Image: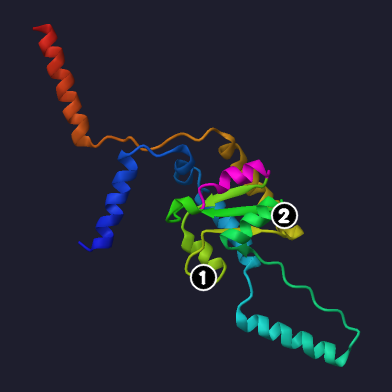
Amino acid sequence: MPLYVRIQRQRAVLKLRVKVPAAVNQFATKALKKDQATTLFKVLSKYRPETKKSRKERLQKQAAVQAENKEAKKAEKPAVVTYGLQEVVQLIEKKRAKLVVIAHDVNPIELVVFLPALCRKMNVPYVIVKNKSRLGYVVHKKQCAVLALETVAAADATAVQQIVDATTALQASRSKAGGLVLSQKTKQAQQKKIKALKNTIQA
């Protein structure tokens, strides 16, 4: 068995056995459902950042128009998602983020574990989604821990609001600690001890 597979399995077992704090456990229990996540990523795909090639083409066209007509107004930058932990935190603190999207499998989790509490304090809607590589695809990266929507078009406002409404009740509920799941072998051993204790008392 490859080493990385063994480490993944050991980590999964540890998460079941060890007590997981509520702040960490919410990333496993409060992620978006599959249909909601599909809708969200359809919206996010409209706000993908420009590639270097597309940005170069846009600037060249803009320069050509200005060369022909000096009074032509500069074209506005397209509305895109903001990514990067520092940039997203600044948007949240300034209350400019319309929606914050956090990946559930960031490693180490300490990088993003404070974000839900910060979003609640600043009254900024947030959602937790599975798979950081899906967020990475949106911003042309392999992986992405968190991103934020600063501007939402009127056509997408309803879809975004539905996702926020669907997750508000779930996020408002008190987060519970996870883990502490005993293995089958331990459960059987405990049952044998209880049975032996009962037999001793009856005797």
What element does badge 1 sit on? loop
Q: Which mark is residue 141?
A: 1
Q: Quadrant of the C terminus?
A: top left
- Identify which residue, 162 or 104, lies in the foreground: 104
Res. 96 mark: 2
Which element type, helix, strand or loop, lies under badge 2? loop
Asked if residue 123 is positioned above or below residue 50 in the image, the reply reads: above
The magenta segment is 112-123
Q: Quadrant of the N terminus?
A: bottom left
Image coordinates for residue 112, horizontal then vertical, percent: 52, 52
Of callouts 2 and 1, which one flags the residue occurring earlier in the amino acid sequence?
A: 2
| Amino acid at dot 2 | Arg
Residue 67 vs 188, above or below: the answer is below
Label 2, residues with CA under 10 Å away: few <14, some 14-19, many ≥20: some
Name which quarter of the figure residue 195 lies in: top left
Measuring from the top left, give residue 140's x and y in whole percent. Answer: 54, 72
